Amino acid sequence: MASTAALLLLADGRFPAGGHAHSGGAEAAVKAGRVHDTDTMTAFLTGRLHTTGLTTAALAAAAATGQDTLLLDAAADARTPSPALRQTSRRLGRQLLRAARATWPHHRLDRLAERFPRGAHQPVALGSAALAAGLTPEQTASIAAYESVNGPATACVRLLGLDPYEVAAALARLAPQLDAVAAAAVAAALLGDPDALPASSAPLLDVYAEQHSSWKVRLFAS
């Protein structure tokens, strides 16, 4: 039986997986003037959810079904055109895997660490951790979809001084879309074919990532 406690722990931003240090493109969007209040933040989060959020949720759900991590990691790499985002994804994957191995020891996690000593892509590591924790693909997709908006929303509070109550309300209003994205991600993952997974992209996020990586002064790592 899937553990609710494990679900909450893996979805918790305080889980030592490094996500709190990343803005998911929000810092660059703020600097560019595209995100400057709660409404523009919500538009940014909505776009991110239906593009990179869907793609990462599907990859994570596929990993949670026990599919080949080599193939899934290659699929993640192909869906991450930005070199800066590839590096970030693998760094986050490495840190998540370290935390997961300490929390839910499992041979699949050990094997993943052996295959990718420099880090598997974050959604592959997330799905593998979820499998080790006894979570379902549905729960895994929900975690990934939630992470795709929660991290940037939290970053906007810090970057813009937004009212955290308004930001929480904005996230709550996204709940039906989060559920829909997670459901679509699971449906694709259950096909069992990495090539059939969503490849929705957000080119501006790729551009922002490359710009952000060159900044000498920044609050977030990405």
Image (cartoon, rainbow, N blue to C red):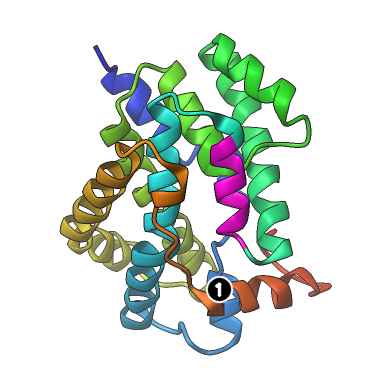
The reply to whether the magenta stretch includes residue 73 is yes
Q: Residue at x 46, y 44 (%)?
A: 194
Residue stretch in magenta: 71-80
Instruction: Name the residue type under label 1.
Output: Leu
List x then y, in percent, for residue 39: 31, 81
Q: Residue at x 47, y 55 (%)?
A: 151
Q: Quadrant of residue 150?
A: bottom left
**Front-most of 6 and 77?**
77
List x then y, in percent, for residue 160: 50, 75
Q: Residue at x 63, y 49 (%)?
A: 89
Q: Residues within 10 Å of mark 1 (few under 14, many from 20)?
A: some
Q: Is residue 111 above or below residue 95?
A: above
Residue 16 showing in the rendered view: no
Farthest residue to the left: give it.
Answer: 176
Q: Residue at x 56, y 16 (%)?
A: 108
Q: Quadrant of residue 209?
A: bottom right
List x then y, in percent, for residue 176: 15, 57
Q: Quadrant of the N terminus?
A: top left
The reply to whether the magenta stretch includes residue 64 is no
Q: Is residue 127 above or below residue 142?
A: above
Q: Which residue is mark 1?
A: 205
**Front-most of 46 and 19?**
46
List x then y, in percent, for residue 134: 36, 16
